[in-house]
Amino acid sequence: MPSEPSSELACLDGRLTPASEAMIPATDEGFLRGDGAFELIRVYNGKPFALVDHLDRLEGSASRLRLPAFERTTLAGEIDSVLAERGGPDFDGCLRIVMTREGRRLLLTEQTPGRAGSIRLGAVTYAPTRVLDGIKSLSYGANMLCSRLARERGFDEALMVTPHGRVLEAPTSSLFWVDPTGTLCTPPLADHILASITRDRILRLVEVEERACTLEDLALAEEAFLASTTREVQPVSAIEETALPDPGPLTRSTTAALREQITAELASP
Ligand SMILES: Cc1ncc(COP(=O)(O)O)c(C=O)c1O
């Protein structure tokens, strides 16, 4: 049976097309070398969540990577057009924005990835590329490989751990854990992790200590969860051989606090 044509859309340098028809020349170094920046924004019923934060981070990434500057008002207008054309309030999904070395500006609508209720994490050794601090770059090959290596070991997702034993984050999400005294903790940005927008929201909503983390700390954890734009809060049911409550009480209350915040921000004009 032929598959249904996708209704996802692209806007490439201002031109709206079906997503499957948007073409970037093979010579663009964004493709050849992963030399570019991107954002993935959650769109709830036509409304992009935390748009200002995502555009700020994209501007920061572009400027640190020395990408050609982009006009923020032009981009904002294109976001409005692509979301309106995709269904306005009927669209619940994601919007990807990609900026390439050659100065191309690509917007893509996408479905929100389906997620399991909870997740089991396996450790993978990874060293952050210091020069990319503060940059959400297109060079995600290492992150994607970490996920594959963890899955090959029978886990659902990777927990990236430096050769010196610092636990950092997952390949596309931030880590939170609850220590034996009941304190909710997350690794600090100084450990060269991504300045996650969801992590930042959670830090403002509930009491969290930013604290360096090791696998030994996690072996004593009472709870853990991942946080990201597409996951919001996702409980972690095991880290290596340590089983965790699924979900624990602080995971539940953080899930509710973040949901409430998202609802409130989406309701404000
Ligand atoms: C490495 C990494 N950490 C954390 C996150 C979560 O960031 P955000 O909350 O901005 O989606 C992401 C998102 O893609 C990521 O790639």
Image: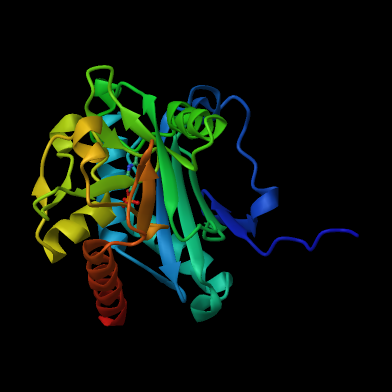
3 left or right of 268 in image? right
Q: Residue furthest right?
A: 1
Residue 67 at least partly seen:
no
Q: Does 18 appear above or below 49?
A: above
Tell me which corner region of the image, top left, top right, bottom left or bottom right, holds residue 194: top left
196 left or right of 16 in image? left
Q: In which quarter of the image is the N terminus?
A: bottom right
Tell me which corner region of the image, top left, top right, bottom left or bottom right, holds residue 166: top left
Residue 212 position, x and y percent, is: 14, 34
Residue 212 at least partly seen:
yes
Tell me which corner region of the image, top left, top right, bottom left or bottom right, holds residue 16: bottom right
Q: Which residue lies furthest to the top in this view?
A: 163
Front residue of this view, candidates 168 and 269: 168
Residue at 52% in and 30% down: 153
Front residue of this view, candidates 238 and 254: 238
Residue at 26% in and 75% down: 265
Q: Does 202 appear above or below 161?
A: below
Residue 162 position, x and y percent, is: 27, 22
Residue 108 position, x and y percent, is: 54, 54
Q: Does 160 appear above or below 9?
A: above
Residue at 54% in and 59% down: 114
Front residue of this view, candidates 57 and 66: 57
